[in-house]
Amino acid sequence: MTLEFKPGKAVDPKRAVRWGALRVAEYRFYSMFKWIGSVIAYGLGNPILYLLSVGLGIGALVDASAGGNTLGVSYIQFVAPALLASAAIQGVMDEVTFPTMDGFVWDKLFFAINATSVSARQIADGVMIVALGRGLLTAVMYLGILLAFGAIPLSSVVPLLLSAMLAGWGWAAVMLAITARLERDEGYFALISRFVIAPMFLFSGTFYPLEQMPIYLQPIGWVSPLWHATQIGRNLSYGLEIGEGMIFLHLGYLALLGVIGMAFVYPKFKERLAR
Amino acid sequence: MITQTILTQAVAIAEKRAQRPGAAIYAGRAAVLIERGFYAAKSSNWLVILSGFVEPVLYLLAFGFGIGQLIGDIEDGSGNPVSYAAYIAPALLATSAMNGAIYDSTWNVFFKMHFGKVYQVMLSSSLGPMDIALGEIAWALMRGAAYSIGFMAIVAPLGLVTNAWGLLAIPAATLIAFGFASLGMAITSYMRNFQQMNWVNFVLLPMFLFSGTFFPVSVYPEWIQVIVKALPLWQGVDLVRSLMLGIVDLSVLWHILYFMVMIGLGLAFTTHRLRALFMR
């Protein structure tokens, strides 16, 4: 039998090893565990600090003034679902941006993996599995702290976790699609964090109802997965009236982000790894 | 021979410089670092540099005007009501001075130390460690001052600076940045890898959230207030807030003294570390 070299087909998808994504995930989990200490410290420290400062500190000012009546609930209950969703989104996103750059550009590990019988699609899936794992860890820790502060009822924990993770997946898919297109790091992540992530965090109805923003700033919230997840979360945790139809709209939007994102991710991974 | 003449002159200049007291530490040529900063900035991504001042503006919009609607007026520390936006604007200016200085003096310096080996090359010329410390910090300060001017140009028309003292907020922000940059550089010299660099954020985030930035420190019990007031960011926030809201008294001088001491200690420490690392 002669070995045949086919450019562009490093791994024949039909011959790819079964469950290849899990093997990619395995290696990535191992490398994540090298600094699991800081993942946990940050995962626990961040919610505690934000709840003490924003929830209780700013909350005391809001609850004491007219704002307390506008919201209908205490300020800490109001911000809790938003902080949870934001933490899940951030946790998931951190695992798809720099590590993807590492796999393609810096260490080029994805090429090495692809040279074995693991397909491009499986590598993308593996990266996503680890990201969701990290997001899950972050979200579970956050939920624990929120419960301890009495910011959410116990019964809402599971649905809150699911909606936050859906938002995390949707946004991570979009970011993975973008990162897979970056050929070099020229400060793009700094720009994305300043011009996309920070506005998204600040203007998605996180700290006050979106309707208080001037109408020309509200679209930031409409396109942001954070706002959709927050609205669902507020409905789940303290019964904010948003209507059943809107719930499905919010969920549908988040799912759509994920599906569209991944639809761009797979072909790009395949094309790039075949170079 | 012309080369011979040039060589002799060069050696003569070098010998003259070397005879000055303290030449091994400070050659008086920190300005060349600024020159290098300009050259290096030319080839980097300008949008990244310019965007540095966007962050406090976004926070001001979101917290000042958004949460401001929920809160209304707040007491400014001497009994007068001010809008929530006017209350947090000075804090955001002080924080962005801190963040800018820390970013420049930690990540930037870390890369130059471990990957670029820039300082090693510089120290093999006539430059001493003090030149590098001063020059590097001066470059960061020029950037920081530019950000402060940009921020003031936005908040002043919004009516968030209530009097002429507010103009002094720009040099005050630069002083704050100087303090953080000189100390930050010394601390960075102990860092060995990226994971350790993350600990810097573990210190900055709580300082940002609890230094009277978003709500007065009077909400805390007495003993926590004492701790918070010892932190450099609270000193900076209180200084800039006094100036921008026009509540100027002698306490301003204490804040300035605090930063002078911080700068002095930081510079001495950084120079010592650069010497220990590269001039063995």
Image: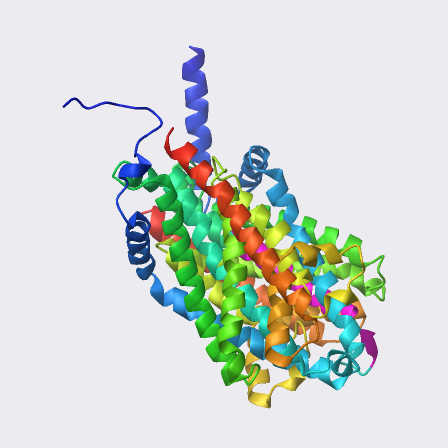
Rendered-image quadrant of the C terminus of chain A: top left
In percent of width and height, residue B82 lies at 82, 75
**Is there any visible trace of residue B87 in the rendered image?**
no
**Horizontal placement of B77 versus A253: left or right?**
right
Q: Residue A93's spot in the image, x, y percent?
A: 49, 55
Q: Is residue B92 magenta?
A: yes
Q: Position of residue B138 (x, y in %)?
A: 58, 48
Main secondary structure of the magenta stretch:
helix
Above-or-below relation of B278 to A82? above
Residue A155 visible: yes
Render colour scheme? rainbow
Q: Quadrant of residue A12?
A: top left
Specify the quadrant of the image occupied by residue A217.
bottom right
Left or right? Give the position of A127 relative to A227: left
* In the foreground, B264 or A253: A253
Give the x, y percent position of residue B112.
43, 44
In front here: B199 or B13? B199
